Image (cartoon, helix red, strand yellow):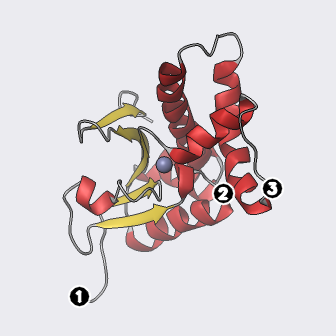
């Protein structure tokens, strides 16, 4: 195969149960996949999306979160004081998940941990998608002038269904 024309860029979690190509039933050359625990957005993820969008003309970016995400769980547990990490590197991931979970936890009880986890996974996807939409001049330009779209989705480990819930109804 010479060259590539992936039709979508997927920013997904490293979780072994969520391989993007298999989830979307795609083959070689179809998807430009970036995987990192918690599908967080740090500069290298933004750069990877910029690279694929600019170099290959890919116009769809999917941030793919998933149920039972370990990175989101770790963040929730830390905010509840149940665990913490000494690793600076792991901390850099938790710290990027933390603000959206913190927002979610303020003003609500944590007696229903399952529903908190569900909401936290989606909130984290929304934050990553927004970061990609607004954290890069290049991507902002492609969104405004060249039809690039960034959407957020969640894969359910229980059902195998992907639900697109962010950036799909508006025109931006
Ligand atoms: Zn995960």
- The mark closer to the camera, 1 or 2, is 2
Question: Which quadrant of the figure has residue 46?
Answer: bottom right
User: Could you tell whether 55 is left or right of 168 in the image?
Assistant: right
Within 10 angstroms of label 2, few (less than 14), some, or many (20 or more) residues? Answer: some
Q: CA distance from mark 1 to mark 2?
A: 30 Å
Mark 2, secondary structure of its residue: loop
Position above or below: 24 against 51: above
Disc 3 versus disc 2: nearer the observer: 3
Q: What is the spatial separation of the Cα atoms under label 3 and label 2, in whole angstroms?
A: 20 Å
State the residue position of label 3.
86
Q: Is residue 156 left or right of residue 34?
A: left
Residue at figure coordinates x 76%, y 44% from the top left? 84
Up/down of 29 relative to 157, above or below: below
Q: Earlier in the sequence, mark 1 or mark 2?
A: 1
- Identify which residue is drawn at 32% across, 38% down: 156
Q: Measured from the top left, where is residue 164 in percent x and y?
A: 33, 35
Along the horizontal axis of the image, is 37 left or right of 60?
A: right
Q: Which mark is residue 1?
A: 1
The quarter in which the C terminus is drawn is top left
Question: Looking at the image, which residue is at 64% across and 54% down?
Answer: 136
Q: Which mark is residue 42?
A: 2
Q: Earlier in the sequence, mark 3 or mark 2?
A: 2
Crowding near the residue tagged with mark 1, few <14, some 14–19, many ≥20 C-alpha atoms within 10 Å = few
- Which x, y percent locates residue 125? 51, 39
């Amino acid at each position: 195969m010479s060259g590539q024309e992936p039709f979508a860029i997927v920013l997904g979690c490293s979780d072994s149960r969520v391989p993007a190509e298999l989830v979307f039933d795609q083959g070689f050359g179809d998807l430009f996949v970036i995987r990192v625990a918690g599908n967080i957005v740090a500069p290298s993820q933004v750069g990877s999306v910029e690279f694929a969008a600019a170099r290959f003309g890919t116009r769809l970016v999917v941030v793919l979160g998933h149920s039972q995400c370990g990175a989101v769980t770790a963040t929730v547990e830390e905010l509840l004081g149940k665990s913490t990490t000494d690793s600076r590197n792991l901390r850099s991931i938790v710290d990027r998940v933390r603000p959206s979970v913190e927002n979610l936890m303020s003003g609500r009880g944590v007696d229903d941990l399952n529903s908190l986890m569900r909401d936290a996974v989606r909130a984290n996807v929304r934050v990553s998608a927004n970061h990609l939409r607004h954290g890069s001049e290049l991507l902002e330009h492609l969104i405004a002038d060249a039809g690039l779209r960034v959407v957020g989705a969640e894969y359910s480990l229980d059902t195998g269904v992907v639900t697109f819930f962010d950036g799909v109804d508006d025109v931006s």
